[in-house]
Image (cartoon, rainbow, N blue to C red):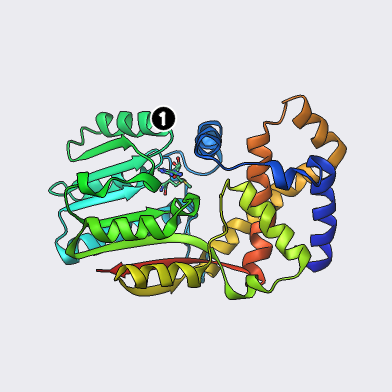
Amino acid sequence: MNQSELKSFLDKTDAIVGKEWLETATSHPEDIASYYTKLRKFYQKMHSEEGAMHFPIKPLEGGGAHAEGLLFHVKDLDTTIKENKYKKVMELGSGVGFNLINLARMNPDVEFIGFDLTDKNIIQARKKAHERRLTNIQFKKRNFDELQVSNFPQQDLIFAIEALCHSKNLDKVIQDSHNILHSNGRLVLFDGYGTKKARTAGEDTLRAADYFSKGFFLPNPQFLDDTLNSGKNAGFEIILKDYTQNILSNFVRFEEGVKLIFRFPWLTRLMIRFKILPIEVFRHGLAGLYGPYLLKYGYAGYFKLDCKK
Ligand SMILES: C[S@@+](CC[C@H](N)C(=O)[O-])C[C@H]1O[C@@H](n2cnc3c(N)ncnc32)[C@H](O)[C@@H]1O
């Protein structure tokens, strides 16, 4: 999507949901859980049968297979675990367990624990771990914005893949993680963030960014520079890697699919009103529609933050 198409899609979006919708669509924990409950099967069908709920990181040359790209994060974390001889690993926002189940299989002598907000995700993750007879892994229901750090055993590695974007208090999660980590430990984040350019963006781009955030049920916009500062203030040394270009091709494919439901806005509006198209699915589509524009024009990026204590 380019600048002139942007305006036309914003108008179509307004025609479907009404301009006031941006003010009223909420991203409370119960909305987030409902989104992941309703979208879980969709993710499984369209994205990853094994239950990955993150973007594939693909090589820039030659594309690479979707399933291989989804394993990029796991392989990267596996290297970190082995190189540092880590023994206790925690995932924040563990979804249906794709990352931890793979890591637990690759590291039978390491203890893994995953926290998630969505009951259905936890049930599914536990079932998969049980079926694979993995005894070094636990999944628990917990809101990562409300970690009670005094209750935790020390961890060597804490990681979150496209989950802390849902945090209402990122400073606190980062500080809590620092407090839970062993002195040689690290926090690894893979996520999308607004860039400096987004702070001075024009009105249309800001609306696109708002629709994008609502699409992924993100409560607050998170910016890369703020997150780096939170990490440094908590006491981490951070190595930053930019993977924006590596996720773009997949996002563009998502955009192409979503554009179909914007062809006849009146029909989409009716389908939402009569619950033929669940609003959560439509919201998800907004992220697919506006995400590539924000990434392509440098208003957002996808990064790995390797935060060493
Ligand atoms: C995009 S999915 C990513 C799942 C997993 N990390 C992966 O890579 O497949 C985000 C996950 O974060 C969980 N989540 C969102 N907000 C949360 C919170 N405040 N506390 C715990 N989990 C949360 C959601 O339920 C969802 O399972």
Residue 105 vs 249, above or below: the answer is: above
On the picture, is 257 further left or further right than 107?
right
On the picture, is 215 further left or further right than 11?
left
Residue topped by disc 1? 119
Q: 57 and 241: which one is in front?
A: 241
Q: Residue at x 14, y 61 (%)?
A: 85
Quarter where residue 200 is shown:
bottom right
Which quadrant does the N terminus fall into? bottom right
Residue 150 vs 226, above or below: the answer is: above
Q: Residue 36: x percent and y percent?
A: 51, 37
Q: Residue 9: x percent and y percent?
A: 80, 54
Q: Residue 107: x percent and y percent?
A: 18, 50
Which quadrant does the C terminus fall into? bottom left
Q: SS of the residue at dot 1?
A: helix
Q: Amino acid at mark 1?
A: Asp
Q: Residue at x 84, y 66 (%)?
A: 4
Q: Residue 149: x percent and y percent?
A: 25, 49
Quarter where residue 72 is shown:
bottom left
Residue 59 shows in the view: no
Q: Residue at x 23, y 52 (%)?
A: 89
